[in-house]
Image (cartoon, rainbow, N blue to C red):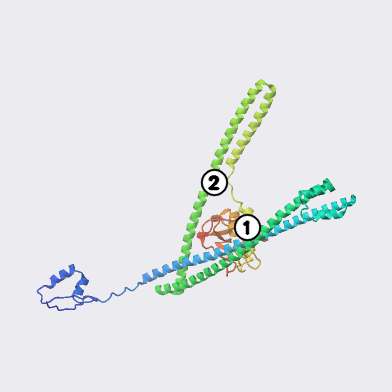
Amino acid sequence: MVLELRKLTLGEDVLICETLGTGISLKTWQKRLMVGAVLAVFSWCGVVLPPATAVPESKSDKIAKLESQIAQNRVKAEKAALAVDQTAAAYAQAFDELQAAETSAKAAISKAKEAALAAESAKAKLGLLAVAKYRQEHHNLADFETITETDAFHTQALKQEVNNILGAKADAQVQSLTALKNVAEVLQEKANQAVQGKKLAAKNLEETEKKARARAQKAVKDLEKASAQREQIIAELARAREISLAQERERQAKAEAARQAALAAAAEKKRQEEAARAAREAERKKAQELHEAQIRAQRQAEAARKAQEAAAAKARADAQERIRAQQAAQLAQDRAVSAAKQAEEIEKKPASIAPSAAASQGVGSALLSWAYGKVGLPYIWGGSGPNGYDCSGLIYAGMRDLGFSIARVASGQYSSLANISYAERQPGDLIFFSSDGTAAGVYHVGIYAGDGKLLHAPRPGQTITVVPLYSVNKIMPYVARL
């Protein structure tokens, strides 16, 4: 069979094999080609297809890819920023523990010294008493020196020996000395433990600082890297969309604002749901307390009724008993009336509320005014002023200067002070941020400055400043009104 190849162009890179001189029509071959595999036919014909050309990436695909990179970059940046805040909070906690340990050690050492001085004073008084008594009775003082110089001066055997010589007055002095020495020994042991605790706290602070600084440095670098990458991606997006860099930045800013608004709406919805649950729980407890009060009142009324009946029965037997029974019945009746009044008061009493804004706004406003005077000062690890502050240190120092004592770290401040729903926030209230929505996860605190602004000490390398509220999905559901 003779084969002849005829190349026919039917588009791009398309070849057709044709057989001639075989007695088989072209249509028959076309049918067979439709049934057979195309690659097998080309191989049989000795024809090789050129390699497939990659389809160029479309403009829309490229933009979508870059937008995805922007989203991934934002997640990295938020993670790095959170790491910086959490390391600062960890350092502040360790710093606060060291200060507490130092205060405890100082107090314990002072008490131990006072107890030791009291014991020495008692020993000296006993010595003077003994010398006077010896001289009065013309004893040899050398014998007494042997007694007073022994380490067992406060033992039972020695007490008996001194008693025999000096009498009951000396016995009281020896008992006082023994008690004071025991107290001094106990306090000295506590002082030693406090000093050891101080050393451990100092070591913990040193280790925490090393780890925190290393982690913070890495997080800051990651944040800077993410920021630089974001600028590169924005530039690529601008080129892909064929718009200016300024226009693309404006577009990204609007997209971020919309995202933050969505997060804020979700967070607000969650807070409202939690507030509704809390209100329902408070109402349930109130109803339960009212029900229990009514039951108690009924029981007391029944007891009063029975008491009155018993009093009346006994009164018929004896006039004097009747008087006492009537008094008892009257007392029981008074109790029943008092219980009924208590039940009515509980029913009328509104659910407990947080301190009124009028009563507390003054302190919050004063703290906010004080904090505005610190704007521009640097963030300092564990700083409580006057040259710099960390986030909770700024709040702690401000309240201290205003004459109030509060917890040093952000989580402690939230646990002890948070009392108002976030939705009711006012300028001067404290706003808290948590990594997991719990009090234990609180890592940052700032002062609400009004108009959606926050005054705070951000993180190492930055200064105290006023910024729009951010990371709204990490804001705790309650604020602290001071």
> In the rendered structure, which amino acid carries the disc numbered 1?
Ala
Which one is nearer the viewer's eye here, 238 or 409?
A: 409
> Taking 248 as reference, is 461 left or right?
right
> Taking 406 as reference, is 148 left or right?
right
- The residue to which callout 1 is attached is 407
Would you say the residues marked 1 and 2 are in contact, meaning their CB atoms lie under 8 Å apart? no
Residue 272 disc label: none
* Whether residue 66 can be seen here: yes
Choose mark 1 or mark 2, whichever is in front.
Answer: 1
How far across and down, in percent of the image, does residue 294 sit? 56, 36
> In the rendered structure, which amino acid carries the disc numbered 2?
Ala
Give the residue displayed 60% in from the left and 40% down from the top: 345
- The residue to which callout 2 is attached is 282
Classify residue 60 by image quadrant.
bottom left
The quarter in which the C terminus is drawn is bottom right
The total of numbered circles placed on residues is 2
How far across and down, in percent of the image, does residue 352 sit? 59, 47
How far across and down, in percent of the image, does residue 306 sit? 60, 28
Q: Rate crowding at label 1 as few (under 14), some (14 to 19) or many (20 or more) other CA atoms within 10 Å.
A: some
As measured in the structure, the alpha-carbon distance from the residue carrying label 1 to the one carrying label 2 is 28 Å
Furthest residue in direction top, as rendered: 317
Residue 332 vs 478, above or below: the answer is above
Q: Rate crowding at label 2 as few (under 14), some (14 to 19) or many (20 or more) other CA atoms within 10 Å.
A: some
Classify residue 20 by image quadrant.
bottom left
Residue 306 vs 7, above or below: the answer is above
* Whether residue 403 can be seen here: no
Which one is nearer the viewer's eye here, 111 or 127?
A: 127
Residue at disc 2, secondary structure: helix
Residue at disc 1, secondary structure: loop
The quarter in which the N terminus is drawn is bottom left
**Among the two numbered marks 1 and 2 on one chain, the one whose residue lies closer to the N terminus:** 2
Classify residue 97 by image quadrant.
bottom right
